[in-house]
Structure formats: C-alpha cells, structure tokens
Amino acid sequence: MVVALAGVDDKLDQAEVAAIKKKVTAKVTVDRKSGLLQLAYEFRTPKQGNDFLIKEKPADVKGGLTLKPSTVATHVVPWETVQVECRVQVSKMFGTALRATESKIGLELGGDNFNTLYLQLPQRPIHKQVIIPYSDVTGLRSLRLELGTDTSLVAYDHWQVSEPTKLGTAGKIEFLGGNYGYAFRAVTFRGKPEASWLKDLVAEK
C-alpha cells in the first residue's frame, strides 16, 4: 500500500529549498515530479545530531542515533504529510519507536510475546496490529511511518498495517528509545513541510 502525500500542487521554490539546506544537516533533494522534499541522514558526521533534539539539546549521533529507554529525540522539521523510513537496530520489540507530535500517530512495538507491530491511534483504546514471526523480531530492521492526507501506515520490514485517518498535519517526528533502547542507523524523510514553518524559515535573516 502507498499512502498519498501532499505536495504535487504546490512545489517548493528555490528560496524555500535554499532555506531548508541552510537549516538542516541532511542530504536535501526534491522530487521533480511530486515536488516532495527528501531529507536523508546516514549519521556519518556529529553535526547531524543538531537536527535531532533531546531536551532541546543536539543528540549524540556517533555511529547512529542511539536512544536509551524512555529517551525522546525530536526532529526539527514539522510536516504536513510525511513518510519516515529508518534502519533500526532492535534488541527487543517493546515500546514506541516513532511518533508524530500533532496527529499523535505512532509506531509501537511490543505485545505479550514481544512480536507485534502496532499502529498507535489517538483516543482509541485498541490500536491496529500485525504479528511478526519470531525469526524476524530482532536485529537491523526497516521501520516506516507514513502519515498522509487520509491514511496512516506503519511497517516493520515488509509487514504493515494501515487505517483511514483525517487528523490534520503530522507535526514534528519524535524518535523514541522504547523500553529497551533503539539504535537508528539511517533515517529518511519524504514529504511536505508545514507551510507556516517554511514561510518563517525563508523570512529568517
């Protein structure tokens, strides 16, 4: 399943792209067809920690964004719609790994047997879920959170679960250490930044 991301009708202009490149340390590209912004992090330089804030301070990204249990690192860009893909070292499937600050949608791992992927939905007691085979519950895994205009999706390798949603803008993306810690080795964002944030960014001197 592919979640529809906004961006086709109002592509980024040169001033906006230049301002984004000045603001973030990621590799910045714009898809010519869709107009969507892509930010890619490989965590090869310490300065990329400036884009992931833990209690308002840059994260230590030596070897990757490694988060201890209960730690939260917030990315600096707020999004209207976004797809976040990560390569994550999972030692134990337990606790939230990704969450959006505005829509409150999240990707959670856990379950009674530590083998379940959950799509966290705000104000709902029961989240949508899918069971992961025990052979694939740990190790370096691909996690994905997609927040579109009318659908939200989470994925763990090729297993995924989605739900129709209309929750407004996604907001900033939080990266969490769960209950046992998660190590994010690479992160890619693809989506449409919030218009008001872009306007203010371009206006900065």
Image (cartoon, grey):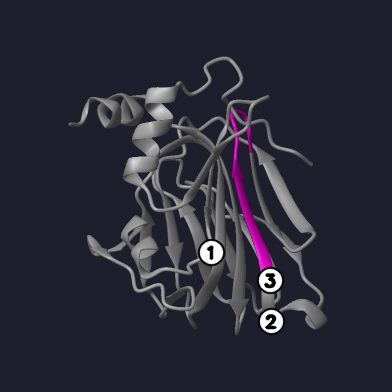
- Residue 194 visible in the displayed image: no
Which amino acid type is marked by label 3? Arg
Q: Quadrant of residue 146?
A: top right
- Local crowd size for mark 1, using a 10 Å CA cut-off: few (<14), some (14–19), many (≥20): some
Residue 74 percent across, percent down from the top left:
36, 57
Q: CA distance from mark 1 to mark 3?
A: 15 Å
List the residue tagged with mark 3.
Answer: 141
Q: Is residue 73 left or right of residue 118?
A: left
* Residue drawn at point x = 78 percent, y = 77 percent: 136
Front one among 42 and 86: 42
> Can you tell which of label 2 and label 1 is closer to the viewer?
1
Residue 150, magenta (yes or no): yes
Of the two numbered discs 2 and 1 on the same chain, state the one appearing first in sequence. Answer: 1
> What quarter of the picture does the N terminus occupy?
top right
Residue 119 percent across, percent down from the top left:
62, 54
List the residue tagged with mark 1.
Answer: 42
Q: Which residues are magenta?
A: 141-151
Front one among 111 and 168: 168
